[in-house]
């Protein structure tokens, strides 16, 4: 039985390695096609990479660039937004996302964050919540090293240094884990989506016959508030709320 488990694990690892190698090959092929300005074919390769399970900000970034070149607004914005989720600090992603948004028809006066809410959000959004969690793990590891140094040190001055280091690392670990928790809860409770219809009406109620609040075009980003009977209640960047069919948007 134990031998069977080892074989199964080994077989799984071999399949995973083959899949990863195939995904990397597809990614390189996509890059070559992009350089040759064959953007439709390049996008198809990058989509295959994602299907193979190789999800990264680089893949989404290149896919966003391909769709931008093809003037496919919603797909371009969507993939740049996905890249930004995985790598919030990348200036190239932010820059290209800005250009892709300019292709969209809608222009909203965004309601700004203010005060402590803005400070916390801006600070914690520097990294993805997984990155914050790993930073916390790293701080915990360093904390135990400092504790070992404190415990085995024979000199008062080094004990004081190690103790101070422990306190500082404990504070940093706590802040990192709190940041990870804040970002995870924020993303779980604030589901964003991109409009994929060329133009569609935001309705006052979740039905086609209800009054129109405003038209909205492809590439616009909305915040999903509620989900009911094939409709999503959404908030627009300017704070206006209404209903859109689920089929009109794609969740990030």
Image (cartoon, helix red, strand yellow):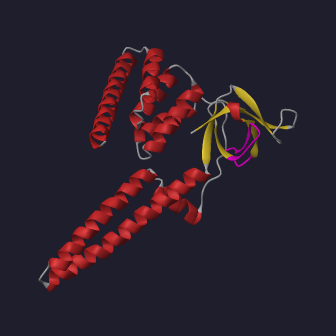
Residue at left 48%, top 29%?
Answer: 64
Residue 249 screen position, x and y as percent? 66, 34
Locate residue 251 relative to residue 217 in the image: left or right.
Answer: left
Residue 153 screen position, x and y as percent? 14, 79
Q: Residue furthest bottom?
A: 156
Q: Residue furthest left?
A: 154
- Eyeballing the image, is 18 above or below 122? above
Segment tinted magenta in the rendering? 225-240
* Magenta region includes residue 236: yes
Locate residue 7 relative to residue 188 in the image: left or right.
Answer: left
* Magenta region includes residue 191: no
Residue 127 in sight from this viewpoint:
no
Q: How many marks?
A: 0
> Which quadrant of the structure image shows residue 106?
top right
Locate residue 251 relative to residue 172 in the image: left or right.
Answer: right
Seen from the viewer's position, the closer of residues 198 and 29 is: 29
The quarter in which the C terminus is drawn is top right
Residue 192 in sight from this viewpoint:
yes
Residue at left 61%, top 43%?
Answer: 192
> Which quadrant of the structure image shows residue 93?
top left
Residue 56 screen position, x and y as percent? 40, 37
Residue at left 31%, top 60%?
Answer: 138
> Which quadrant of the structure image shows residue 219?
top right
Seen from the viewer's position, the closer of residues 20 and 251 is: 20
Q: Residue furthest front?
A: 1
Residue at left 27%, top 77%?
Answer: 164
Residue 115 screen position, x and y as percent? 58, 64
Locate residue 55 relative to residue 75 in the image: left or right.
Answer: left
The quarter in which the N terminus is drawn is top left
């Amino acid at each position: 039985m134990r031998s069977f488990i080892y074989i199964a694990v080994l077989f799984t690892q071999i399949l995973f390695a083959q899949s990863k190698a195939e995904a990397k090959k597809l990614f390189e092929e996509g890059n070559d096609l992009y350089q040759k300005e064959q953007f439709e074919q390049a996008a198809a390769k990058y989509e295959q990479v994602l299907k193979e399970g190789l999800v990264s900000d680089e893949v989404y970034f290149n896919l966003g660039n391909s769709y931008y070149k093809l003037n496919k607004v919603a797909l371009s914005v969507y993939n740049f937004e996905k890249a930004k989720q995985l790598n919030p600090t990348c200036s190239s992603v932010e820059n290209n996302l800005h250009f892709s948004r300019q292709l969209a028809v809608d222009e909203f006066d965004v309601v700004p964050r203010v005060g402590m809410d803005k400070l916390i959000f801006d600070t914690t959004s520097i990294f993805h919540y997984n990155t914050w969690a790993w930073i916390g793990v790293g701080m915990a590891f360093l904390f135990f090293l400092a504790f070992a140094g404190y415990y085995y040190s024979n000199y008062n001055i080094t004990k004081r240094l190690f103790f101070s280091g422990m306190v500082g690392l404990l504070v940093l670990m706590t802040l990192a884990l709190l940041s990870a928790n804040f970002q995870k809860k924020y993303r779980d409770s604030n589901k964003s989506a991109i409009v994929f219809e060329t133009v569609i009406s935001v309705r006052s109620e979740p039905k086609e016959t209800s009054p129109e609040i405003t038209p909205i075009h492809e590439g616009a980003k909305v915040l999903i508030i509620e989900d009911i009977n094939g409709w999503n209640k959404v908030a627009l960047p300017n704070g206006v709320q209404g209903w859109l069919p689920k089929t009109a948007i794609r969740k990030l």
